[in-house]
Image (cartoon, rainbow, N blue to C red):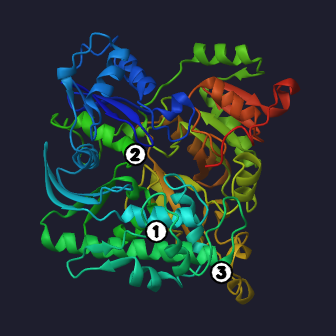
Amino acid sequence: MRVLGLSAEHADSAAVLAAAGRLVAAAQEERFSRGKHDAAFPARAAAYCLAAAGLDGLAALDRVAVAGGGDAAVLTRHLQTLDPAFDPRRLICPPLDLCHAAGGFLPSPFAEALVLVLDDGGDGLTVAAGRGDALRILERHPQPLGWLYSAVTAYLGFKPGSGEYKVMGLAPYGEPRFAATLLEHLLHWRDDGLFTLNTAPLRPPFHHPALAALLNGPPRPPEAPLTQRHMDVAASLQQVTEQTLVRLTRALAARHPQRDLCLAGGMALNCVANGKLLQDGAFRRLWVQPAAGRAGAALGAALLDQPRPARAADEDGMQGGYLGPAYDQPAIEAALRAQGAAFTVLDEQSLLARAAADLADGKALGWFQGRMEFGPRALGARSILADPRHPAMQAQLNLKIKYRESFRPFAPAVLAEEAAAWFDLPCSSPYMLLVAPLAEARRHALTAKQRTLTGFDRLALPRSALPAVTHVDGSARVQTVDGRHHPRFRALLEAFFRRTGCPALVNTSFNVRGEPIVASPAEAFACFMGSELDALALGDCYLEKSLQPQALRRQTRAAFAPD
């Protein structure tokens, strides 16, 4: 069976093509339209998926499944634009939460699991049970926990629907002194592990005066300075979220027999909370859909009612998340020549040695290799890489390359077999969705004076042997790399390890603030020339910034709207 799964008319619209239960291709529309979190019908993403499967239209599909549905006539018009011969009887619209649950369970490595869908919109939470190819909904609770997080995100001056991860990154700089207020007035815990929200101050568009009254001050205007009070609000929100989810999962574990848990829905991207759930141990194992937001619903729609292919016991069906477009070497070279770029073509060993040497010298490297990632995380295919041992690297990447707030944390990609020596992480984390403490042996003790610092005064303190990726609370958002699906990225980590004794690199998405992750060679070169990246490895091509024609320099700081 061939199915095209779609999510549309909501941020992060996407298309996914699956055949016989195996993912063939997947991409978000934003990567093609270049509008971040694009909510438009994913026509370009769907066209890519069809092309990747070798199909020239929709006729060879058994069905098109749109997660959550929509206006059937409008959907039919869009699909008939892709293929005028499309038969609308092949269109189905499975429920959104069922699609999220399918995306959470069917690609997971578990034969049987409980699935918790934490939608970041207004659809509340859903509990499902998966076994083999079957999936059934057990509980539905119309309490949109995501509204609380989005409302406070907006109050803090960030864009709801995209800025929640900034709040998560800001939280360690504050103290949770508003947590009791949030629990008293906005979120009430129930004895059964569930909760009730006071939704009146939380409804979109998220600017209710009652929230400002509760938090002792007016909303922060976008781009205004961040104060200690803002940090404390973020810390309070994050703590309440973590505690709520821990209570919820403990209750679910007590009333359902499954011992493994899958997470889906936009709130499952809160990797700090995920780490706390894993640490709590209510469930034996945890797996999070890498594209947990609406893009993951498209994936679930494509996989619903399809068989699950046989896989190794520890292997999921996401193929490392590398499901987007790839470009062969002739196409890359042609794109660079069209731009007037100066580049050298290297064999793989020379490319890896050159990149590792530049990284060890403190240079920031654009890395464009293989198929693009599906989901919000760059996993070594469309990445900016750097040496995590440099104390100033976090600030340098944020301010001079990404053009974003200085407090924003970065993640380490680490060789899988070396992870335990550097991080207190009890399992693999290939999709950068778990936060774990640095191993005790890798941490640096702070002086008495340093421990008295507050807020952003703590930002520059070197807390570990990997200061560029260590958060102020001594943790990191870890990506473990085994090389199963991206051997070249693995080989670069190995080359860097041999040269430096460090098995990790800073890994952040290849884009500047407000821009979707680059998808094509031309976009990669434009981002390279519009930022202060030092070098670019694009396929087998290696580029140095200092050798590029001055006329090709561009300014991207103001090219995209703030995220």
**Relative to residue 424, is residue 465 drawn left or right?**
right
Name the foreground residue: 192 vs 482. 192
Task: Judge the density around disc 3: few (<14), some (14-19), many (≥20) Cα neighbours within 10 Å.
Answer: few
Secondary structure under the numbered disc 3 in the rendered image:
loop
C-alpha distance separating marks 1 and 3: 17 Å
Q: Quadrant of residue 54?
A: top left
Q: Of the residues under marks 1 and 3, which one precedes in the sequence?
A: 1
Count of labels in the image: 3
Task: Judge the density around disc 2: few (<14), some (14-19), many (≥20) Cα neighbours within 10 Å.
Answer: many
Name the foreground residue: 332 vs 176. 176
The quadrant of the image that shows the N terminus is: top left
Q: Position of residue 27 (x, y in %)?
A: 43, 32
Q: Of the residues under marks 2 and 1, which one precedes in the sequence?
A: 2
Q: Relative to 342, does residue 126 appear above or below in the rendering?
A: below
**Any part of residue 227 in sight:** yes
Disc assigned to residue 445? 3
User: Which residue matches tag 2?
Assistant: 291
Q: Position of residue 376 (x, y in %)?
A: 48, 45
Q: Position of residue 29 (x, y in %)?
A: 46, 32
Disc assigned to residue 424? 1
**Any part of residue 428 in sight:** no
C-alpha distance separating marks 2 and 3: 37 Å
Q: Quadrant of residue 441?
A: bottom right
Q: Tag 3: residue type? A: Ala
**Relative to residue 406, is residue 46 drawn left or right?**
left
